[in-house]
Image (cartoon, grey):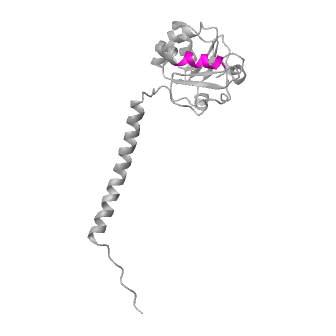
Amino acid sequence: MSEAPLETPKPRQRSLGRTIAILAPLALFVALAGLFLVSLERGGDPSLVPSVLIGKAAPATNLKPVEGLTLPGLTTADLASGKPMLVNVWASWCAPCRQEHPVLEQLAQDPRLTLVGINYKDQPDNARAFLGQLGNPFSRIGADPSGRTAIDWGVYGVPESFLVDGKGVIRFKFIGPLTDEAVATTLMPELDRMEKGG
């Protein structure tokens, strides 16, 4: 009993298969580009990147003080002190950190908030010089020379700021240098919402 010969695809079928193979990736690219453009049109702020840590306890933190400063370091227990904290991740070598520093100095005057810092991948001498030149808005600064703690916090780069409630839960994350406008339109409303129990 002989087997029936396999049918060879007709030229038209081969052409259709090739067309689909070429057009499918192109259609996927166009769909993704469309989604990107829609998100831009809706006015999304790239500084407000969602964090998986929002609504969760701050990561375990046990940072020694910056060598040569009289300020204490930063620990998990400090973050749950009963008062809201703004945790600012900064470095002396970071130009945007210099740009945002006057805003941090103003925020340090707000009695509703305690400002603490994580000094990221910095040399102690440089960190001290930076604060000596620009002023020190922080009540505590933990040294993170390896950047390991910043990774645990989900830091993309410096500066970044986290609003932590009095129980040590992260409520808000801001990427990039804080400006007067960002404080007025995003940070203060979040602090107000936190105070109202929202």
Q: Residue at x 64, y 8 (%)?
A: 111
| Rendering quarter of residue 5 | bottom left
For residue 117, say whether it is visible. Answer: no
Q: Is residue 5 above or below residue 57?
A: below
Task: Work out which quarter of the rendered image holds the N terminus and state it.
Answer: bottom left
Q: Residue furthest left?
A: 11
On screen, residue 40 versus residue 117, left or right, reads left
Q: Is residue 175 above or below residue 18?
A: above
On screen, residue 193 versus residue 2, left or right, reads right
Residue closest to the eye, 45 or 66:
45
Magenta range:
186-196
Q: Position of residue 81 (x, y in %)?
A: 72, 18
Q: Residue at x 35, y 44 (%)?
A: 30
Q: Position of residue 139 (x, y in %)?
A: 64, 12
Q: Residue at x 51, y 12 (%)?
A: 101
For residue 173, say whether it is visible. Answer: yes
On screen, residue 5 versus residue 66, left or right, reads left
> Magenta stretch: residue 127 in it?
no
Q: Is residue 125 above or below residue 9?
A: above
Q: Residue at x 56, y 15 (%)?
A: 188
Secondary structure predominantly adopted by residues drawn in magenta: helix
Number of callouts in the render?
A: 0
Q: Position of residue 153 (x, y in %)?
A: 60, 29
| Rendering quarter of residue 168 | top right
Q: Position of residue 47 (x, y in %)?
A: 48, 25
Residue closest to the eye, 6 or 74:
6
